[in-house]
Image (spheres, rainbow, N blue to C red):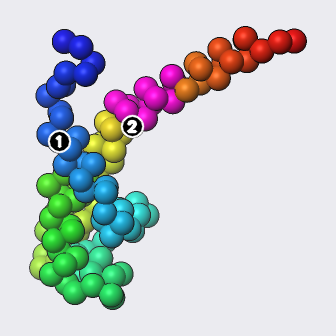
Amino acid sequence: MSQLEGTGSDESDDAVFKALANSTRRRVLDLLKARPHTTGEVCEAFPDLDRTTVLQHIRVLEGADLVTGRKDGRTRLLALAPLPIKRIHDRWIGEYTRAAVGLLAQLDDDSPR
C-alpha cells in the first residue's frame, strides 16, 4: 500500500481536520488545554454564543475524539484528548518537517564555500 492510499484512519483524520477548521472549536481546545472544565464553564467562556451553539461545537470535538466528557454528579467534566492531534502531527506535520529540514540541509551542502 502506498502512502497516498488510505491508512484506515482517514475518516477519523477528516473529523479532526473538520473540527480544527473552526476557530471557536480551536478556542474550546485552548481552554481545555489548561485544565478540564465543566460544560457550564465552557459555555460561560463564550458569552457571545448561546449555550446550544457551544454544545454543538463540543459535540463536533467529541465526535473527532478531541474532547472527552465524564459525569461528575450533575455536572459534566470536559477534558482535552490530545492523541488525535498527535496522530495528525505524526502523519502530516512531522513528515513535512523532516522533508523541509532535509531540503534545507541539501541547500546548505550545495552552497558555494
Q: Position of residue 63 (x, y in %)?
A: 14, 55
Residue 89 — which label?
2
Mark 2 burial class by Cα count in 10 Å: few <14, some 14-19, many 20+: some
Q: Position of residue 38 (x, y in %)?
A: 25, 75
Q: Position of residue 81 (x, y in %)?
A: 28, 51
Residue 37 vs residue 15, the one in the foreground: 15
* Picture quadrant of residue 53: bottom left
Which quadrant holds the C terminus? top right
At horizontal 59% and vertical 24% (from top left) the residue drawn is 101
Taking the view exactly as shown, the residue that stands out farthest to the right is 113
Q: Is residue 71 left or right of residue 101?
A: left
Q: Image height check: is 48 above or below 17?
A: below
- The reply to whether residue 36 is visible in this rendering is no
- The reply to whether residue 103 is visible in this rendering is yes
**What is the three-letter code of the residue carrying label 1?**
Ser
Q: Is residue 60 left or right of residue 89?
A: left
Predominant SS of the magenta segment: helix
Secondary structure beneath dot 2 equals: helix
Residue 102 vs residue 40, the one in the foreground: 102
Q: Is residue 28 magenta?
A: no
The residue range painted magenta reads 90-99
Secondary structure beneath dot 1 equals: helix
Q: Pointer 1: what residue?
A: 12
At horizontal 22% and vertical 87% (from top left) the residue drawn is 50
Contact (Cβ within 8 Å) of mark 2 with mark 1: no
Residue 41 — which label?
none
Q: Image height check: is 26 above or below 106?
A: below
